[in-house]
Amino acid sequence: MADITTPADDCEVCAKPAEPDNRLKSGAHIRYCYQWRRRNDTSRPECSTAKCGRRARAGSTDLCDRCYQRAQRGNDPAGRPFHQANKGKTCAVEWCEDVATRLGWCVTCYAWSRRNGDADPTGRRYRYSRTLDDLIALVLTIAPDPVTGCRSSRGVFAPNRDGYAITTIAGDQRTQRVTRLVLAHTLGRPILPAMHACHTCDNPPCVEPSHLWEGTAEDNSRDRDTKGRGARGVSNGRSRLTPARVREIRARYIPGNNQHEGNIAALAAEFGVKPQSIRDVVRRRTWAHVL
Protein backbone atom coordinates (compact mmCIF):
# COMPACT_ATOMS: atom_id res chain seq x y z
CA MET A 1 0.00 0.00 0.00
CA ALA A 2 1.35 3.38 -0.95
CA ASP A 3 2.42 5.83 1.73
CA ILE A 4 -0.26 8.52 2.05
CA THR A 5 2.39 11.07 3.00
CA THR A 6 4.03 10.70 -0.40
CA PRO A 7 2.90 13.39 -2.90
CA ALA A 8 0.38 11.81 -5.26
CA ASP A 9 -0.77 12.60 -8.75
CA ASP A 10 -3.70 14.84 -9.47
CA CYS A 11 -7.22 13.62 -8.83
CA GLU A 12 -8.50 11.34 -11.60
CA VAL A 13 -11.90 13.06 -11.58
CA CYS A 14 -11.34 16.81 -11.14
CA ALA A 15 -7.57 16.99 -11.90
CA LYS A 16 -6.95 18.95 -8.70
CA PRO A 17 -3.96 18.07 -6.52
CA ALA A 18 -4.68 15.39 -3.94
CA GLU A 19 -3.43 17.08 -0.79
CA PRO A 20 -2.21 14.95 2.16
CA ASP A 21 -5.25 15.69 4.29
CA ASN A 22 -7.86 14.66 1.69
CA ARG A 23 -6.29 11.76 -0.21
CA LEU A 24 -8.17 8.47 -0.43
CA LYS A 25 -7.24 5.14 -1.97
CA SER A 26 -3.55 5.89 -2.21
CA GLY A 27 -4.12 9.43 -3.42
CA ALA A 28 -6.12 8.52 -6.53
CA HIS A 29 -8.97 10.88 -5.60
CA ILE A 30 -9.63 13.72 -3.22
CA ARG A 31 -12.35 12.91 -0.71
CA TYR A 32 -15.33 14.54 -2.50
CA CYS A 33 -14.50 13.09 -5.91
CA TYR A 34 -14.04 9.64 -4.39
CA GLN A 35 -17.56 9.77 -2.97
CA TRP A 36 -18.91 11.10 -6.26
CA ARG A 37 -17.24 8.31 -8.22
CA ARG A 38 -18.64 5.67 -5.90
CA ARG A 39 -22.14 6.97 -6.66
CA ASN A 40 -21.62 7.52 -10.40
CA ASP A 41 -19.14 4.87 -11.56
CA THR A 42 -20.65 3.67 -14.85
CA SER A 43 -18.74 0.42 -14.64
CA ARG A 44 -20.99 -0.65 -11.76
CA PRO A 45 -24.60 -1.74 -12.27
CA GLU A 46 -27.46 0.38 -11.02
CA CYS A 47 -28.96 -0.28 -7.61
CA SER A 48 -31.65 -2.98 -7.72
CA THR A 49 -34.06 -0.79 -5.72
CA ALA A 50 -36.71 0.66 -7.99
CA LYS A 51 -36.47 4.42 -8.66
CA CYS A 52 -33.16 4.69 -6.79
CA GLY A 53 -30.92 5.48 -9.76
CA ARG A 54 -27.64 5.17 -7.83
CA ARG A 55 -24.79 2.81 -8.63
CA ALA A 56 -24.39 -0.41 -6.68
CA ARG A 57 -21.61 -0.53 -4.14
CA ALA A 58 -18.53 -2.70 -4.61
CA GLY A 59 -18.78 -6.30 -3.51
CA SER A 60 -21.42 -8.97 -3.86
CA THR A 61 -24.43 -6.76 -3.11
CA ASP A 62 -26.54 -5.19 -5.85
CA LEU A 63 -27.59 -2.26 -3.64
CA CYS A 64 -26.13 1.22 -3.43
CA ASP A 65 -24.61 2.54 -0.21
CA ARG A 66 -27.85 4.09 1.08
CA CYS A 67 -30.08 1.13 0.27
CA TYR A 68 -27.50 -1.29 1.67
CA GLN A 69 -27.31 0.60 4.96
CA ARG A 70 -31.11 0.71 5.18
CA ALA A 71 -31.31 -3.04 4.52
CA GLN A 72 -28.69 -3.66 7.23
CA ARG A 73 -30.95 -1.87 9.72
CA GLY A 74 -33.81 -4.19 8.81
CA ASN A 75 -35.77 -1.68 6.72
CA ASP A 76 -37.08 -1.97 3.20
CA PRO A 77 -34.84 0.11 0.90
CA ALA A 78 -37.81 0.82 -1.40
CA GLY A 79 -39.63 2.58 1.46
CA ARG A 80 -37.25 5.50 1.77
CA PRO A 81 -37.73 8.83 -0.06
CA PHE A 82 -35.35 8.95 -3.00
CA HIS A 83 -33.10 11.84 -3.81
CA GLN A 84 -33.86 13.71 -7.01
CA ALA A 85 -31.77 16.35 -8.70
CA ASN A 86 -33.57 19.66 -8.11
CA LYS A 87 -31.10 22.21 -9.41
CA GLY A 88 -32.57 24.26 -12.23
CA LYS A 89 -35.92 22.43 -12.13
CA THR A 90 -39.42 23.54 -11.28
CA CYS A 91 -41.80 21.66 -9.02
CA ALA A 92 -42.94 18.30 -10.38
CA VAL A 93 -46.56 19.26 -9.71
CA GLU A 94 -47.98 20.23 -13.10
CA TRP A 95 -49.64 23.52 -12.14
CA CYS A 96 -46.91 24.66 -9.73
CA GLU A 97 -44.19 26.96 -11.08
CA ASP A 98 -42.05 27.27 -7.95
CA VAL A 99 -38.45 26.07 -7.80
CA ALA A 100 -37.99 22.42 -6.86
CA THR A 101 -36.16 21.93 -3.58
CA ARG A 102 -36.93 18.45 -2.20
CA LEU A 103 -37.87 15.23 -3.97
CA GLY A 104 -38.59 17.25 -7.09
CA TRP A 105 -41.22 19.36 -5.29
CA CYS A 106 -41.21 22.95 -4.09
CA VAL A 107 -41.26 23.87 -0.40
CA THR A 108 -45.06 24.24 -0.28
CA CYS A 109 -45.86 20.97 -2.06
CA TYR A 110 -43.29 19.06 -0.01
CA ALA A 111 -44.74 20.46 3.23
CA TRP A 112 -48.25 19.46 2.07
CA SER A 113 -47.00 15.94 1.40
CA ARG A 114 -45.48 15.69 4.90
CA ARG A 115 -48.68 16.98 6.52
CA ASN A 116 -50.75 14.40 4.65
CA GLY A 117 -48.82 11.24 5.37
CA ASP A 118 -46.29 11.55 2.50
CA ALA A 119 -49.11 11.69 -0.05
CA ASP A 120 -48.41 12.71 -3.63
CA PRO A 121 -49.12 16.47 -3.92
CA THR A 122 -49.74 16.25 -7.67
CA GLY A 123 -53.48 15.82 -7.18
CA ARG A 124 -53.98 18.46 -4.50
CA ARG A 125 -56.20 21.46 -5.21
CA TYR A 126 -54.52 24.58 -6.57
CA ARG A 127 -55.42 27.42 -4.22
CA TYR A 128 -54.82 30.25 -6.65
CA SER A 129 -56.30 28.86 -9.90
CA ARG A 130 -59.82 30.34 -9.45
CA THR A 131 -60.45 33.43 -11.54
CA LEU A 132 -62.93 36.17 -10.70
CA ASP A 133 -65.37 34.82 -13.31
CA ASP A 134 -65.07 31.36 -11.74
CA LEU A 135 -65.80 32.89 -8.35
CA ILE A 136 -68.95 34.67 -9.57
CA ALA A 137 -70.13 31.49 -11.30
CA LEU A 138 -69.62 29.56 -8.07
CA VAL A 139 -71.52 32.18 -6.06
CA LEU A 140 -74.48 32.00 -8.45
CA THR A 141 -74.66 28.21 -8.02
CA ILE A 142 -75.53 28.70 -4.34
CA ALA A 143 -79.29 28.37 -3.93
CA PRO A 144 -80.85 31.50 -2.37
CA ASP A 145 -82.89 31.21 0.80
CA PRO A 146 -86.60 31.17 -0.13
CA VAL A 147 -87.46 33.61 2.68
CA THR A 148 -84.54 36.04 2.91
CA GLY A 149 -82.99 35.62 -0.55
CA CYS A 150 -79.51 35.25 0.98
CA ARG A 151 -76.94 33.00 -0.65
CA SER A 152 -75.11 31.49 2.31
CA SER A 153 -71.39 30.81 1.80
CA ARG A 154 -71.26 28.17 4.54
CA GLY A 155 -69.78 24.96 3.20
CA VAL A 156 -68.62 26.65 -0.01
CA PHE A 157 -66.01 29.17 1.15
CA ALA A 158 -63.87 29.20 4.27
CA PRO A 159 -65.06 31.75 6.87
CA ASN A 160 -62.85 34.14 8.78
CA ARG A 161 -63.27 34.68 12.51
CA ASP A 162 -66.05 37.23 11.87
CA GLY A 163 -68.05 34.80 9.72
CA TYR A 164 -67.31 36.44 6.36
CA ALA A 165 -66.38 34.19 3.42
CA ILE A 166 -62.77 34.45 2.27
CA THR A 167 -60.91 33.12 -0.76
CA THR A 168 -57.97 33.73 -3.11
CA ILE A 169 -57.89 34.65 -6.80
CA ALA A 170 -55.53 33.51 -9.55
CA GLY A 171 -52.43 35.68 -9.71
CA ASP A 172 -52.98 37.11 -6.21
CA GLN A 173 -52.07 35.11 -3.13
CA ARG A 174 -53.78 37.54 -0.74
CA THR A 175 -56.76 36.24 1.19
CA GLN A 176 -59.74 38.46 0.39
CA ARG A 177 -63.39 38.66 1.41
CA VAL A 178 -65.72 37.17 -1.15
CA THR A 179 -68.21 40.01 -0.60
CA ARG A 180 -65.67 42.62 -1.73
CA LEU A 181 -64.86 40.63 -4.87
CA VAL A 182 -68.54 40.08 -5.70
CA LEU A 183 -69.39 43.76 -5.15
CA ALA A 184 -66.42 44.89 -7.27
CA HIS A 185 -67.63 42.63 -10.08
CA THR A 186 -71.15 44.06 -9.77
CA LEU A 187 -69.91 47.67 -9.83
CA GLY A 188 -67.45 46.97 -12.65
CA ARG A 189 -64.56 48.57 -10.77
CA PRO A 190 -62.33 47.82 -7.77
CA ILE A 191 -63.52 48.86 -4.31
CA LEU A 192 -61.33 51.51 -2.71
CA PRO A 193 -59.40 50.34 0.39
CA ALA A 194 -61.30 52.82 2.59
CA MET A 195 -64.69 51.52 1.44
CA HIS A 196 -66.61 48.53 2.81
CA ALA A 197 -68.84 45.93 1.21
CA CYS A 198 -71.93 46.37 3.42
CA HIS A 199 -74.94 44.03 3.74
CA THR A 200 -78.57 45.10 3.45
CA CYS A 201 -79.50 41.76 5.03
CA ASP A 202 -77.01 42.06 7.93
CA ASN A 203 -75.96 38.45 7.33
CA PRO A 204 -72.14 38.08 7.20
CA PRO A 205 -72.09 34.70 5.32
CA CYS A 206 -74.37 36.10 2.59
CA VAL A 207 -72.71 36.58 -0.83
CA GLU A 208 -75.83 37.54 -2.80
CA PRO A 209 -74.79 40.41 -5.14
CA SER A 210 -78.06 42.33 -4.72
CA HIS A 211 -77.60 42.37 -0.92
CA LEU A 212 -74.26 44.22 -1.09
CA TRP A 213 -73.64 47.96 -1.23
CA GLU A 214 -70.54 50.14 -1.02
CA GLY A 215 -70.09 52.45 1.94
CA THR A 216 -67.62 53.88 4.38
CA ALA A 217 -67.10 52.62 7.91
CA GLU A 218 -69.24 55.51 9.13
CA ASP A 219 -72.03 54.55 6.72
CA ASN A 220 -71.85 50.98 7.93
CA SER A 221 -72.02 52.04 11.60
CA ARG A 222 -74.92 54.39 10.92
CA ASP A 223 -76.79 51.61 9.12
CA ARG A 224 -76.13 49.32 12.09
CA ASP A 225 -77.46 51.84 14.60
CA THR A 226 -80.51 52.65 12.47
CA LYS A 227 -81.45 48.98 12.45
CA GLY A 228 -80.86 48.69 16.18
CA ARG A 229 -78.06 46.14 15.89
CA GLY A 230 -75.50 48.12 17.86
CA ALA A 231 -74.43 46.99 21.31
CA ARG A 232 -75.98 49.86 23.21
CA GLY A 233 -77.61 50.07 26.59
CA VAL A 234 -77.99 46.80 28.46
CA SER A 235 -77.01 44.85 25.30
CA ASN A 236 -73.46 46.09 25.87
CA GLY A 237 -71.88 43.51 28.13
CA ARG A 238 -69.64 46.15 29.77
CA SER A 239 -72.50 48.44 30.78
CA ARG A 240 -72.95 49.07 34.53
CA LEU A 241 -76.13 51.08 34.19
CA THR A 242 -79.74 50.21 33.40
CA PRO A 243 -82.56 52.35 31.93
CA ALA A 244 -83.99 52.80 35.45
CA ARG A 245 -80.65 54.02 36.81
CA VAL A 246 -80.20 56.33 33.83
CA ARG A 247 -83.56 57.97 34.51
CA GLU A 248 -82.67 58.32 38.20
CA ILE A 249 -79.31 59.93 37.37
CA ARG A 250 -80.94 62.46 35.07
CA ALA A 251 -83.65 63.23 37.65
CA ARG A 252 -81.15 63.74 40.49
CA TYR A 253 -78.54 65.61 38.49
CA ILE A 254 -77.84 69.13 39.79
CA PRO A 255 -76.30 71.44 37.15
CA GLY A 256 -73.15 73.27 38.16
CA ASN A 257 -71.14 76.17 36.75
CA ASN A 258 -67.66 76.66 35.35
CA GLN A 259 -66.06 76.18 38.78
CA HIS A 260 -68.43 73.55 40.13
CA GLU A 261 -69.83 70.43 38.49
CA GLY A 262 -72.82 70.01 40.78
CA ASN A 263 -73.23 66.47 42.12
CA ILE A 264 -71.52 64.56 39.24
CA ALA A 265 -68.78 63.20 41.51
CA ALA A 266 -71.29 62.03 44.11
CA LEU A 267 -73.47 60.29 41.49
CA ALA A 268 -70.42 58.61 39.97
CA ALA A 269 -69.37 57.23 43.36
CA GLU A 270 -72.90 56.07 44.14
CA PHE A 271 -73.48 54.23 40.87
CA GLY A 272 -69.94 52.87 40.53
CA VAL A 273 -68.97 54.60 37.29
CA LYS A 274 -66.58 57.35 36.28
CA PRO A 275 -67.66 61.03 36.37
CA GLN A 276 -67.37 61.20 32.59
CA SER A 277 -70.00 58.45 32.30
CA ILE A 278 -72.39 60.61 34.34
CA ARG A 279 -71.67 63.61 32.10
CA ASP A 280 -72.38 61.53 28.98
CA VAL A 281 -75.66 60.27 30.46
CA VAL A 282 -77.03 63.68 31.45
CA ARG A 283 -75.93 65.25 28.15
CA ARG A 284 -77.41 62.28 26.22
CA ARG A 285 -74.18 61.34 24.54
CA THR A 286 -74.94 57.83 25.73
CA TRP A 287 -78.27 56.15 26.54
CA ALA A 288 -79.95 58.62 24.18
CA HIS A 289 -82.65 56.04 23.42
CA VAL A 290 -83.82 56.16 27.07
CA LEU A 291 -86.42 58.91 27.55
Image: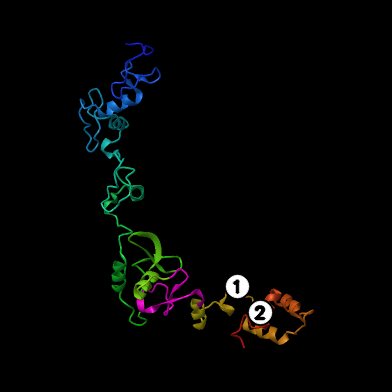
User: As drawn, which residue projects farthest toward the right?
Assistant: 259
- Expressed as whole percent of the image width and height from the top left, the position of residue 88 reads 30, 42
Residue type of the residue flagged with mark 2: Asp
Which residue is label 2 attached to?
Answer: 280
- Figure colour scheme: rainbow
Local SS, label 1: loop
Local SS, label 2: helix
Q: Is residue 117 magenta?
A: no
Is residue 195 something that shows in the picture?
A: yes
State which quadrant residue 125 falls in.
bottom left
Residue density around tag 1, few if under 14, some if 14–19, many if 20 or more, within 10 Å: few
- Relative to 2, does residue 198 appear above or below in the rendering? below
Magenta segment, which residues? 192-218
Residue at (67, 83) in percent of width and height: 283
Left or right of 65? Residue 242 is right
User: As drawn, which residue projects farthest toward the bottom?
Assistant: 291
Residue at (34, 26) in percent of width and height: 32
- Expressed as whole percent of the image width and height from the top left, the position of residue 38 reads 28, 26
Left or right of 225? Residue 246 is right
Which residue is label 1 attached to?
Answer: 238
Q: Nearer the viewer, residue 56 or 87?
A: 87
Residue at (38, 21) in percent of width and height: 22
- Expressed as whole percent of the image width and height from the top left, the position of residue 151 reads 34, 75
- Relative to 7, does residue 246 appear above or below in the rendering? below
Q: Nearer the viewer, residue 156 or 240?
A: 156
Q: Nearer the viewer, residue 77 or 124?
A: 124
- Expressed as whole percent of the image width and height from the top left, the position of residue 113 reads 33, 49
Left or right of 262? Residue 286 is left
- Quick check: marks 2 and 1 in contact, CB under 8 Å? no
